[in-house]
Amino acid sequence: QTLGCEAHLLERQELQQLYNSSGLAGRLQGVDGLLIQRLKAEASVIALIAEARRQGIPVVVDLDDLLFDPEHAPPPLANYAGSITPEQHRRFQATQPQLEATLAAADLLLFSTSELAEGWQRYRNARGIPAVPVQLWPNLIPTPLRNACRQPQIRQLRQRSGRLRLVVASASTPHLLAWHQQLVPALVQLMQQHPRLQLDLLGSVPLAAPLEPFRQRIRCRGHSDFSTYLQRLAEADIGLMVLEPGPFTDAKSPNRWMECSLMGLATVLSPIRSCRELLGDRKHTLFADSQQAW
């Protein structure tokens, strides 16, 4: 849109309605390109791709998580620390071939990290999937974040008063095992040692039982719209991102670091590959992979 193009968003529910009413052909008339983001090849998606092919419209598929390789996706059930059932986990596994089919049907693939692109090339070669062009498009700054950080947010840490506020944010649940095993014990120790230290938990991060004694200094704020999330993030001094090690997390984008840094927070992160390739330890962030390091 910034370049003067016209973009239309077709949500999954509307796509299903068009498929049911045989309206896909009309919806694609006058379209120059079709970009599919993270949709599995169910009947409506297959029909959409087929109609784009019939009309000579190029199909681009965008993916920002390592979801196509059953060896690494979904993450092991144990990583969810009881937040999903075994049946839900099996359902994730069962739909993996549908995502592979969407990727295989593309004229062009967009990946957000080099780890994703390399992983797809290895997987494609092993499966004999025909090659298509691949481009690397790292995640850029979302507009609400760009607007929020126009004014300098960097501020002195509130060390003198001892009122530092930590924040842990997550929009998903696969990484709860690392939260419980690594970060929670470290936070318990920190909260004991620093009686004025405060903690915010945003999104899907649960209040773990060992942190209950410090409940008066902890805010559990759940999910919110993105602008509110940024406001809540900016109230803290140090952002923490804990992820389990492995290929699935190595391929993730460093979005949390970007959000925290642009909102003026120092950060401590799990050393996933995409972060290690981009960021310098003790220069842009601190890396931690054990309770003592946290």
Image (tube, rainbow, N blue to C red):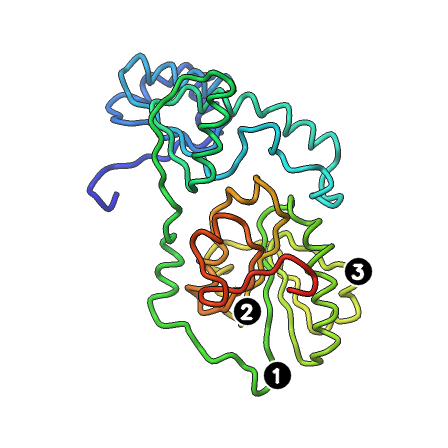
Q: In the rendering, at what x and y percent does residue 1 appear?
A: 26, 43
- Judged by depth in the image, the label closer to the viewer, 2 or 3, is 2
Residue type for callout 3: Ala
192 horizontally vs 242: left or right:
right
Q: Which image quadrant is residue 268 in? A: bottom right
Q: Secondary structure at mark 1?
A: loop
Q: In the rendering, at what x and y percent does residue 91 appear?
A: 66, 27
Front-lying residue, 32 or 90 = 90
| Residue at image coords 48%, 53% | 275
Give the Cα distance between marks 2 and 1.
13 Å
Residue assigned mark 3: 209
Front-lying residue, 15 or 260 = 260
Crowding at label 3, few (<14), some or many (≥20) Cα neighbours within 10 Å? few
Q: Which mark is residue 238?
A: 2
Residue assigned mark 1: 162
Q: In the rendering, at what x and y percent does residue 237 appear?
A: 53, 72
Residue type for callout 1: Gly
Q: Which quarter shows the C terminus?
A: bottom right
Crowding at label 2, few (<14), some or many (≥20) Cα neighbours within 10 Å? many
| Residue at image coords 62%, 56% | 222
Q: Is residue 247 above or below residue 155?
A: above
Residue type for callout 2: Ile
120 horizontally vs 241: left or right:
left
Give the Cα distance between marks 2 and 3.
22 Å
Give the Cα distance between marks 3 and 1.
25 Å
The answer to which of marks 2 and 3 sits earlier in the sequence is 3
